[in-house]
Image (cartoon, rainbow, N blue to C red):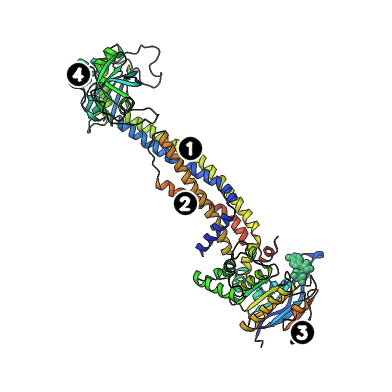
């Protein structure tokens, strides 16, 4: 069910600070994720998960080593080219939802399409479709303040998938949600992975959340400590 | 895309109405001042020009006393010799190139009708006065030659006098008391409005010179002689001829200065108009400074806006906004903001100018060019002063921006 390699890290280092204070958030990471895979990334706090996710999502570049996305050397593109890459291929879901305040759900979902130059009427229609896919019909004109945490995260997911990206990057997407809401969101992500063939890279601290993925990569001190297929769930 | 951005910026301006308004105050005041000053200035210039042409185009005014200049007007060493009837007669007989020559003596006098009274400028003159000053009658007739000669008790009144005594009614045939004499109204003068100095030109009563001299002034002096040049003769050519004739009749030897002055109203009009322009320019510079202050206000608020919305910028960058999208967003916002200030300023400025035009009775003459310029200028201020904050927003690192707060 997984296709060709979508992203690959080749001896990727990411370092901050100088001299004594130098910190290696990533210290020579090698990994590959194939198209259509649903990967959970786990590890203790400070182990480099977010740093890796930022590079995977083309928000950041490695200090050394190579990061390729669809065979493109994305780690060496300038920021505007990476912006284009994100707009065309990547959707983001964050722990804190990161919706624009005082802006309706529909307008939030339309945002990536604006930067793509999609016409207004088409934008509206695509946003409505994405909101329907995450089960938010009837909430299109609510602002984030008028929505629950679970609903806000659904809007964020709709915004991430409205451009039909290849990759969804989710950094602790259920970190702010209760158990029931967590499982709803995970079922949604699982469905999007299955139905749209969306590749998902997701950071989580919880084993039962990671269990929704088909593969788990564990980080420790900037290294990949383990990388294993999950057992099929009943 | 641009329209979308304009809409976004309007939304964000509306979210912070009070703050946006305070920010705009500098621009509003600057633009309002510029618009008000330029509009009032051009109204004044128009008014001055109109006044002079109402005074009579191509008009020379002769008065007794030494002309202004080195030594000062009048001078202490000489007794002012008034103009006399023989001066007028000499001009009428010998001056070529004049369309009308008319004497005038004037005094503020209490005019009474029934129980109403009004202090009015009463002028003794002849029937050529209306021609010399380009003044028409709304109704009635001018003095006849015989009335002028005999100094009959007849008079022409201005609009203000009519309104005071008769309201909208017809004053013709009514008898008013002027000082200790009375006169019959035979005509109504066309309204002229106020001069640039706020003097009511319609609060006047004209009567034959002889009647004025005998019954009001009590002497035979003439205060001034109005000379209107004909179409072919420029006033600059007419002036030396008038001077020669008057020096001759007044027997002024070549070693002595004129004991009268000749004022060329056209030149005075030009001088006044250029003085108004200079003043407008200076006030405009003051207004320019307040626009600069307004621009700095815009810059300040845009820096605050960029900082406050760092997270928003991070979100936009993460989902694929190009640097230029962020730059344009904040530039448009600054421009819309300052344009809004400019438009409010224009409206306030025009309102001020309209009020001024009513109170100063000058024409309200807004200039489309000036308004367009103000619109363009306020947009420019937004772009110039919004650029640095916008660039700062566009250059933010998306990861740092997302972590903000
Ligand atoms: N911008 C930064 N400057 C300095 N150090 C950083 C920066 N970002 C991350 N780090 C450091 O890199 C390490 C990994 O961070 P991160 O990837 O956020 O870990 P995780 O998401 O697994 O908790 C941490 O020690 C963190 O302090
Ligand atoms: Mg993290």
Real-space CA distance between mark 4 and mark 1, rounded to the nearest whole angstrom:
52 Å
Q: Chain of mark 3?
A: A
Helix, strand or loop status at disc 4: helix
- The count of marks equals 4
Mark 2 surroundings: few (<14), some (14-19) or many (≥20) residues within 10 A: few
User: What residue is pinned by disc 4?
Assistant: B147
The image quadrant where one finds ligand 1 is bottom right
Quadrant of the rendered image containing residue A178: bottom right
Real-space CA distance between mark 3 and mark 1, rounded to the nearest whole angstrom:
80 Å
User: What residue is pinned by disc 2?
Assistant: B376
Image quarter hosting the C terminus of chain A: bottom right
User: What residue is pinned by disc 1?
Assistant: B282
Q: Nearer the viewer, residue B57 or A129?
A: A129
Q: Position of residue A16 (x, y in %)?
A: 75, 67
Whether residue A138 sits left or right of residue B120 in the image: it is right
Whether residue A135 sits left or right of residue B143 in the image: it is right
């Amino acid at each position: 069910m997984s296709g060709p390699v979508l992203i690959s890290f080749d001896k990727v280092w990411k370092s901050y600070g100088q001299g004594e204070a130098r910190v290696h958030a990533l210290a020579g990471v090698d990994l590959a994720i194939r198209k259509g895979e649903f990967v959970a990334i786990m590890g203790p706090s400070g182990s480099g998960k977010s740093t890796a996710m930022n590079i995977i999502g083309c928000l950041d570049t490695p200090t050394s080593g190579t990061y390729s996305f669809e065979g493109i050397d994305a780690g060496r593109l300038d920021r505007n080219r990476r912006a284009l890459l994100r707009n065309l291929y990547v959707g983001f879901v964050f722990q804190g939802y990161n919706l624009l305040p005082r802006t309706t759900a529909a307008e939030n979902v339309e945002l990536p399409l604006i930067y793509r130059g999609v016409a207004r009427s088409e934008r509206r229609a695509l946003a409505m479709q994405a909101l329907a896919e995450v089960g938010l019909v009837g909430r299109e004109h609510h602002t984030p303040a008028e929505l629950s945490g679970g609903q806000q995260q659904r809007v964020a997911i709709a915004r991430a998938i409205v451009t039909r990206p290849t990759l969804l990057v989710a950094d602790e997407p259920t970190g702010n949600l209760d158990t029931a809401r967590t499982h709803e969101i995970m079922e949604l992500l699982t469905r999007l992975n299955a139905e749209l063939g969306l590749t998902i890279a997701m950071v989580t601290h919880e084993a039962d959340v990671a269990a929704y993925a088909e593969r788990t990569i564990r980080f420790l001190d900037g290294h990949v400590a383990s990388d294993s297929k999950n057992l099929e769930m009943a | 895309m641009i329209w979308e951005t304009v809409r976004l910026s309007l939304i964000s301006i509306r979210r912070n109405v009070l703050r946006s308004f305070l920010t705009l105050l500098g621009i509003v005041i600057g633009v309002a001042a510029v618009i008000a000053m330029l509009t009032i200035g051009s109204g004044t210039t128009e008014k001055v020009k109109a006044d002079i042409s109402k005074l009579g185009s191509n008009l020379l005014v002769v008065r007794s006393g030494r002309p202004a200049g080195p030594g000062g007007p009048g001078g202490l060493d000489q007794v002012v010799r008034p103009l006399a009837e023989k001066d007028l007669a000499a001009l009428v007989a010998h001056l070529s190139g004049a369309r009308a020559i008319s004497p005038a003596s004037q005094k503020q006098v209490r005019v009474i009708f029934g129980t109403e009274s009004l202090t009015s400028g009463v002028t003794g003159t002849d029937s050529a006065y209306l021609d010399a000053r380009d003044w028409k009658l709304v109704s009635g007739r001018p003095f006849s030659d015989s009335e002028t000669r005999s100094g009959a008790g007849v008079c022409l009144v201005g609009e203000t006098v009519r309104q005071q005594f008769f309201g909208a009614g017809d004053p013709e045939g009514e008898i008013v008391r002027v000082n200790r004499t009375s006169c019959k109204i035979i005509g109504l003068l066309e309204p002229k409005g106020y001069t640039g100095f706020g003097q009511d030109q319609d609060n006047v009563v004209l009567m034959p010179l002889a009647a004025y001299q005998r019954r009001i002034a009590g002497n035979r002096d003439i205060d001034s002689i109005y000379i209107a040049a004909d179409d072919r003769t420029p006033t600059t050519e007419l002036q030396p001829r008038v001077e020669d004739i008057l020096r001759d009749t007044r027997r002024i030897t070549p070693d002595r200065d004129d004991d009268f002055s000749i004022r060329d109203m056209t030149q005075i009009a030009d001088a006044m108009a250029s003085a108004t322009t200079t003043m407008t320019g200076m006030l405009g510079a003051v207004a320019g400074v307040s626009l600069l202050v307004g621009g700095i206000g815009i810059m300040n608020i845009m820096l605050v806006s960029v900082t406050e919305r760092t997270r928003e910028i991070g979100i936009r960058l993460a989902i694929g906004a190009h640097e230029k999208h962020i730059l344009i967003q904040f530039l448009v916002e600054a421009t819309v903001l300052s344009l809004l200030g400019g438009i409010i300023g224009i409206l306030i400025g025009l309102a001020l100018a309209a009020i001024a035009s009513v109170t100063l009775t000058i024409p309200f003459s807004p200039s489309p060019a000036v308004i367009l310029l103000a619109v363009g200028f306020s947009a420019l201020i937004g772009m110039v002063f919004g650029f640095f904050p916008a660039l700062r927003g566009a250059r933010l690192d998306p990861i740092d921006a997302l972590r903000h707060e």
